[in-house]
């Protein structure tokens, strides 16, 4: 969010009579941990609007990566989640929270993550996926994929990535003879039958392990 946008939102909410410049507030907020941001959303409607803004989320994520803190997203059998510091697992970075979609609280399966977004699958379903941002508690239930059905072989792998050229996030589900791609911007699935590289046989699951 640009400085002008921040100032405009504060003006709309009638909160321009503050001692701290708006760009300073924005700068400070981008450097706070997620746990603090969730608490500060209730400070005012203007702060909530800033923290929930997509552009702010991106900047905050890049800032967090620059600081080098690596986190573990821990899922409990009770359906609760919390973040822990990878270098100090006893340090809880965010209080436990339930997945916001109630019907998936007990059957959500974490598949992968990218830029603070988490791809979750209903382990009782073969084609129901949800994108979740634990930092803002926002989520999007993806449209059911028309190319995945009980007649097809179960998916071999899935992934979540950012297409920087299009500023789009994409979900990829790989089957034996084809793969499907969901575009967050377009809100739809596309079927692909030409693989960029040959798939190995006799494998159960594939996970990209980036260093």
Image: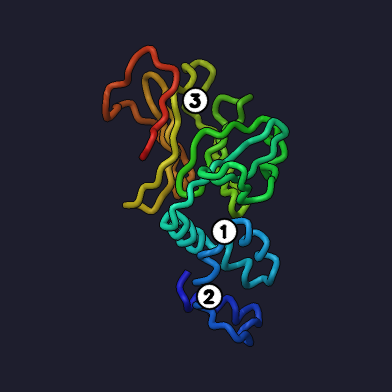
- Answer left or right for 133 relative to 43: left
Q: Residue drawn 68% across and 61% down? A: 39
Q: Which corner quadrant of the image does residue 173 belong to? A: top left
The foreground one among 33 and 184 is: 33
Within 10 Å of disc 3 (Cα), the crowding (few <14, some 14-19, many 20+) is: some
> Which quarter of the picture shows residue 38?
bottom right
Q: Position of 39 compared to 66: left or right? A: right
In this rendering, the count of numbered labels is: 3
**x, y percentage for residue 172?**
42, 34
Q: CA distance from mark 3 to mark 1?
A: 39 Å
Q: Which residue is mark 2?
A: 6
- Split into 4 quadrants, where in the image is the C terminus? top left
Q: Is residue 142 above or below residue 42?
A: above
- Which x, y percent locates residue 151? 50, 15
Q: Determine the secondary structure under disc 1.
A: loop
For the residue labelled by badge 3, is the local secondary structure a helix, a strand or a loop? loop
Residue 158: which disc? Answer: none
* Mark identifier at residue 33: 1
Residue toward you, 171 or 108: 108
Task: Please tell me the numbered disc located at residue 148.
Answer: 3
């Amino acid at each position: 969010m640009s400085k002008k946008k921040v100032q405009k939102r504060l003006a709309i909410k009638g909160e321009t009579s503050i001692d701290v410049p708006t760009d300073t507030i924005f700068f400070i907020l981008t450097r706070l941990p997620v746990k603090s941001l969730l608490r500060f959303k209730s400070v005012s409607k203007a702060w909530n609007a800033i923290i929930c803004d997509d552009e702010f989320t991106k900047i905050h994520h890049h800032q967090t990566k620059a600081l080098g803190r690596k986190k573990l997203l821990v899922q409990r059998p009770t359906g609760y989640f919390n973040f822990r510091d990878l270098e100090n697992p006893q340090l809880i970075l965010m209080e436990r929270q339930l997945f916001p979609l109630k019907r998936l609280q007990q059957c959500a399966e974490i598949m992968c993550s990218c830029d603070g977004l988490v791809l979750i699958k209903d382990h009782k379903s073969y084609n129901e996926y949800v994108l979740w941002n634990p930092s803002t508690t926002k989520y999007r239930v993806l449209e059911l994929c028309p190319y995945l059905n009980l007649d097809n072989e179960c998916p071999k792998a899935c992934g979540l990535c950012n297409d920087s050229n299009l500023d789009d996030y994409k979900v990829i589900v790989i089957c034996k003879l084809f793969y499907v791609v969901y575009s967050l911007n377009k809100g739809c699935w596309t079927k692909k039958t030409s693989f960029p590289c040959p798939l190995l046989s006799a494998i159960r699951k594939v996970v990209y392990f980036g260093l």
